[in-house]
Image (tube, grey):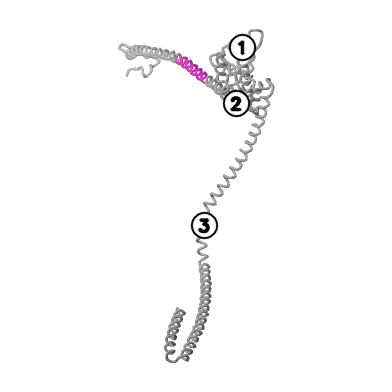
Amino acid sequence: MQIFLILFVAFIAAVAGYLLGMILTRRAGETALSEAREAALQAKIRLEAFEKAQTESFKTQAEALKAQTEALKAEFKNLSADAWRNESDALRKTHLAGLEALLKPLAKDIDTFRTQFVVSHTSLDHYMKELAARTDNLGREAENLAKALKGSSKLQGNWGEAILANLLEASGLTQGRDYTLQFHVSDGKGGTLIPDVVINLPDDRRLVIDSKVSLKAYADCVAAENDEERGKLLKEHVKSLRQHVRELSEKDYARVIGGSIGYVLMFVPVEGAYVAAVQADPAFVTDAYARHIIPVNPTNLLMALQLAYHLWQSEMRQRSVHEIYEEADKLYRKFTSFANNFVKIGHSLQQLQRTYEDAERQLHTGRGNIVSRLEGWKKKGLNPSAALPEELREE
């Protein structure tokens, strides 16, 4: 503000000098003008000197203010450090107590998590080992499947029988009691038929299962590289299945196996082979059924086997109920006999009671009983050597 005030004063002085110069010019001429100029120059010099001095003063004051600010910062920092040091012990204890209260449950949770992690990690390792083993087994089974499907009819038949055996075991049926493997029966023409499995059903009924279907065409179809070849091989696959249906129908198991339900289950051990045949030839199943042959895949066969298992369970329950009924009937007949005898004993006891009462009256309670008459003899001078029981003596 001082600088602007000085400038303003200088400006006024300059204007005044100019006016004065004009007046002096009129009055004094060149001399007065020269003096006015000299005065203006001196005023300018003084103004510049004052401005420089003020600038230096402001610079000095700014540096001093900066130094004071730094000093205040340092002092405040020192004061804060002192305050922290003075209160650090109490605050540390308070904070440690609070942190301990917060961290103890956290530490417990961490320990629990660590334990669970170790257990889970162990279980995961075990599961991964099992998964690796199963994957390895699955790979071997897939390789065996590929070999079986592309191998000879004998190899395919053995593989199908192995799959069938696994399904029989899974169904709950018992070999030798509920089903027979490689059942031998005469065809009535001097030959022998050997169905793969004969399922025994309640009421002496039997169900034949055949697993000798050929799947070579299906394996080639799956491996085909183009649609045209795949379609051709799929037709070969359906043709092979239909041919097997005709062969089974000609064996006429329903006639040669006593108690047969009249239908044979033709087991197709690969789900995809069964589905592909049905999709390619929707009439395949109905045509086979007309020949008393029922094509089944593993899923359908397992359902049929479990149905047989539950039929046996129901049969066993019915037999148990029948046996219980027979035992209950026998027990009832025995109880009836006992009840009749019990009634007879009651009647006999009642008759015995009446006989006893009659005898008692005759002996000592009735009129003219034997005891009273004998006791009367004692009054007449009879002195017997033995005495009657107290209960029979007259009072």
Most extreme residue toward the top is: 189
Q: Nearer the viewer, mark 1 or mark 3?
A: 1
Which residue occupies the foreground of this view, 377 or 311?
Answer: 311
Q: Is residue 77 magenta?
A: no
Q: Residue at x 59, y 10 (%)?
A: 255
Which residue occupies the foreground of this view, 41 or 255?
Answer: 41
Q: Residues within 10 Å of mark 3 (few under 14, many from 20)?
A: few
Per the image, the residue denoted by label 1 is 250
Report if residue 12 is visible in the image: yes
Earlier-in-chain disc, 1 versus 3: 3
Q: Cα distance, mark 2 to mark 3? A: 65 Å
> Is 247 situated left or right of 76 in this image?
right
Q: Residue at x 52, y 56 (%)?
A: 100
> Is 259 situated left or right of 342 in this image?
right
Describe the element under mark 3 as helix, strand or loop.
helix
Q: Which mark is residue 108?
A: none
> Is 280 situated left or right of 343 in this image?
right
Q: Which mark is residue 99?
A: 3
Most extreme residue toward the right is: 152
Describe the element under mark 1 as helix, strand or loop.
helix
Find residue 301 and report its image quarter.
top right
What residue type is disc 3 on? Leu
Which residue occupies the foreground of this view, 77 or 328?
Answer: 77
Q: Nearer the viewer, mark 2 or mark 3?
A: 2
Residue 162 lies, in percent from the top left, at: 64, 23
Q: Residues within 10 Å of mark 1 (few under 14, many from 20)?
A: few
Q: Residue at x 57, y 20 (%)?
A: 281
Magenta residues span 314-332
What residue type is disc 2 on? Gly
Q: Which mark is residue 272?
A: 2
